[in-house]
Image (spheres, rainbow, N blue to C red):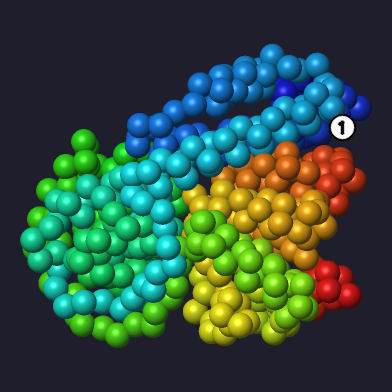
Amino acid sequence: MFCYQCEQTAGGTGCTKVGVCGKNEDLASLQDTLIFGLKGIAAYAYHARELGYHDEEIDSFMEEALFATLTNVDFDMERHLELLLKCGAMNLKAMELLDKAHVERFGAPTPTKVFTGTKAGPGILVTGHDLLDLYELLKQTEGTGVNVYTHGEMLPAHAYPELRKFPHLVGNYGTAWQNQRSEFEEFPGAILGTTNCVLIPKETYKDRMFTCGVAGLPGVTHIKNRDFTPVIEKAKSLPPLPEKEGKTITTGFHHKSILGLADHIITLVKAGKIRHFFLVGGCDGAKKVRSYYTEFVQKVPQDCVVLTLGCGKYRFNYLDLGEIEGIPRLIDIGQCNNAYSAIQVALALADAFGCSVNELPLSLVLSWFEQKAVAILLTLFHLGVKNIRIGPSAPAFISPNVLQILQDKFNLQLITTPEEDLKAILG
Ligand code: SF4
């Protein structure tokens, strides 16, 4: 942990202010949390701006918050916490802005079945979050015989009418970001990385990989001005993909789709047919302990519904959990860029039941990894949401004191085992 007063590693051998650093570790923790939250906001705001949407208040907060990290060295825990909650509020605005930009440009997502095999012919695999890049690529590949596949975090694209109208957007290939290196190696076509989470490529596919926009990788050709000609030419020059069967997964439960079912959901809850909702979502990573989330979903009782979003879902989105009187027991809202929909669902259900989000039969079990996950957590704190479970471990930049404060204020909890957590939640 870097100490902002000593300008040393806090408590390290060069630390000359023993006794002060104990406090500085917390200051560093709060400032790191803020900076990670700002990175998350920046990701949402960037995509919105690319689509022609921006918000002066968000821009102004970014300046204020970044400036505060170099000016506000006077340690005041409350003041820093207020700044974190404001970061959460601004992230909510940024997510709302991006959702508006996506819906107005590409139409409101609706539940969509997505093929996960391959079609015979040349193909391009697109990863990242930039739907505008995907749209431009789909336009430029029209009539060329080149098929386009989404990878991992690009899965929700299939649910937007203006994207799925292209018949050569044929399916989703692969899973979460940490599996990219093996999945990209296996995919025989060209590959395009539009944003994070993209990994340094292996030599085996580096020459057929491209980046664009903010993404960049060493030794990989970078596309400028959304002219994807080199990607398309590369795909045509490679051996065609084989016809390969795949299962079908469903995504695209935007809040408007879910809220269209609100009356039925409320009736089922009041009749005791749906006992509880679990939002099991967030990022994914390579650690084995993340199998917790698969086991958790498998052990959720039959009278409960699982809402999900983000890369964590690839650990269980192939499961057939069935339905409760027409309501799917596994509802995929989308990726990290669709977290706004999950929040809208929770707020609308609380409104319909005449209670707070904390009083709903809803528990949040989140897996964190990347900066957007930090920003979303701050948004949930800003909304006063309590009893969130996160895992697989506390973020390394959260100091023990800061974790304690978040536990005291919001009853933030770390995951334990699926059995113990389910028992604690359901009783
Ligand atoms: S859900 Fe998390 S890990 Fe997955 S793409 Fe989004 S930020 Fe990256």
Please identify the residue farthest to the top as the structure is shown: 71
Whether residue 113 is situated above or below residue 48 in the rendered picture: below
Residue 129 at x, y percent in the picture: 40, 50
Q: Residue at x 52, y 74 (%)?
A: 317
Whether residue 399 is situated above or below residue 179 in the rendered picture: above
Q: Residue at x 78, y 65 (%)?
A: 361
Q: Residue at x 73, y 39 (%)?
A: 382
Residue 296 at x, y percent in the picture: 69, 75
Residue 423 in sight from this viewpoint: yes
Q: Viewed as shown, does residue 48 lie left or right of 218?
A: right
Q: Residue at x 63, y 82 (%)?
A: 324
Tally the numbered discs: 1
Quadrant position of the N terminus in the picture: top right
User: Where does label 1 land, which residue?
Assistant: 22
Question: Which one is in front, 118 or 181?
Answer: 118
Residue 125 in sight from this viewpoint: no
**Residue 169 position by quadrant:** bottom left
User: Around disc 1, counting alpha carbons within 10 Å, would you say few (fewer than 14), some (14 to 19), or many (20 or more)?
Assistant: some
Q: Viewed as shown, does residue 353 lie left or right of 199?
A: right
- Check mark 1 vs ligand 1: CB closer than 8 Å? yes or no: no
**Mark 1: amino acid:** Gly
Label 1 element class: helix
Quadrant position of the C terminus in the picture: bottom right
Q: Viewed as shown, does residue 366 lie left or right of 408?
A: left
